[in-house]
Image (cartoon, coloured by chain):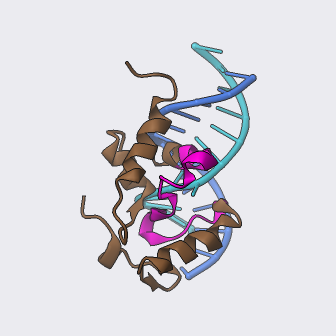
Chain colours: A brown, B cyan, C blue
Amino acid sequence: MERKRGFDVRVYEAVRRIPRGRVLTYGQVARRLGSPRAARAVGWALRRLPERLGRSVPWHRVVGSGGRLSTRAGPGVEIQRRLLLAEGIRFRAGSVDLTRHGAHS
DNA sequence: AGCCTGACTCAAA
DNA sequence: CTTTGAGCCAGGC
């Protein structure tokens, strides 16, 4: 049975499956959840990501369309950029090079 | 049920 | 390339 917060949990589980060195856009995550248009809701779920899960959920591997980092993430953006660079993610004009790290599905 | 918010996205200017 | 506006979704009140 699905609960009210089922969506949030699904988002975390989906993000948890993103392999190192690979990134997905909010829209792609939404697509994997069966709601292609729920990109916004995905961002909302990640924003409320509990610190406790921060260690097991690679939230930094989720970026905006075109590989751009979400500016709304606040100070966390720099941390995200650092984490991505640390796992070999390449950037192209300030955005993640999706042609190299983006998912095809 | 109605209204508001937001780590989104796409198209247009 | 940057800025707007509209569409979409789930959650909280």
Q: Which residues are magenta?
A: A43-72
Can residue A41 be seen here? The reply is yes
Q: Can residue A51 be found in the magenta stretch?
A: yes
Which residue is at a point 35% across and 41% down the rendered structure image? A33
Q: Look at 64% across and 74% down and name the residue there.
A: A78
Q: Nearer the viewer, residue A23 or C13?
A: A23
The N terminus of chain A lies in quadrant: top left
- In x, y percent, where is residue A34? 32, 39
Please state which of residues A34 and A57 is positioned toward the viewer in this rendering: A57
Confirm whether residue A49 shows in the render: no
Q: Which is nearer the eye, A56 or A80?
A: A56
Image-based side of A95 in relation to A2, left or right:
right
Q: Position of residue A8 (x, y in %)?
A: 49, 37
Where residue B7 appears, x then y in whole percent?
59, 54
Residue A2 image point, x, y percent: 41, 22
Above or below, A59 relative to A84 = above
Say whether residue A49 is magenta.
yes
